[in-house]
Amino acid sequence: MPKYKKYRKKRREEYKEEMEKISDIKQDMYSSSIKSLLIGAGFFVVSLLLNGNLIPIPVEEGNYLDIILIIVKSILIIGFFGFTMVGLANNLELRGSPASIREVIIITSIALIQSVRSGAVFGISLLGIVIFCVYLWLLQPKVQTV
């Protein structure tokens, strides 16, 4: 009879250790999603400052600096979209529900509204967001099967 009690106690301890590991992993995932959302917010603020011309940078059209500025503005918008999407999706996954198409459309709209003032920034940002969404869509089935 002592073997049975010892086995049950050992099994209970193993279960507690396993639950603590899962709790630690979930805490790390939650803090990672918060960090991603904060980085996305940083990209959003800097993008609004540059794309809204709150910080005017005088450059001549067709100049190398103009092209670099368009690329930087587009990268900021794509960075906002990427980090916000990953952070939100991880947070929703921790709660037990996947990101719906509604959240994707809202984040995409916010990202593209930032670039309305410039057609080149809008085009590059739209292309980057579409490539990012296709990448996530193609990556999803591979992650689920592993």
Image: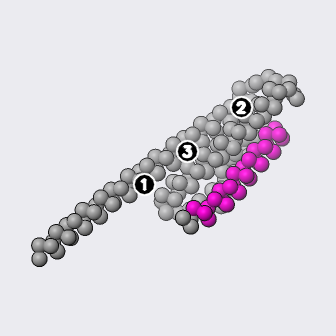
Query: Do the residues under discs 2 and 1 have CB atoms within 8 angstroms?
Result: no
Query: Which is more toward the observer, 28 or 56?
Result: 28
Q: Residue furthest right?
A: 62
> On the image, which quarter does residue 12 sit in?
bottom left
Residue located beneath label 2 in the image: 50
Name the residue at 88% across, 29% down: 62
**Outermost residue to the front:** 3
Mark 3, residues whose alpha carbon is within 10 Å: few (<14), some, or many (≥20)? many
Q: Identify the residue position indicated by label 1 in the image.
A: 26
Q: Which secondary structure class fits the magenta region best?
A: helix
Q: Nearer the viewer, mark 1 or mark 3?
A: 1
Query: Which sits earlier in the primary sequence, circle 2 or circle 3?
Result: 3
**Range covered by the magenta-colored residues:** 118-143
Judge from the rendering whether residue 120 lies leftward or rightward of residue 46; answer left or right: right
Q: Residue furthest left?
A: 2
Does any portion of residue 102 appear in the rendered image? no
Whichever of callouts 1 and 3 sits on the residue coming sooner in the sequence is 1
Q: Position of residue 122 (x, y in %)?
A: 79, 43
Residue 42: give x, y in percent of width and height. 59, 36
SS at badge 2: helix
Residue 3 versus residue 28 in the image, above or below: below
Q: Residue at 11%, 77% (x, y): give it.
A: 1
Amino acid found under the numbered disc labelled 3:
Leu
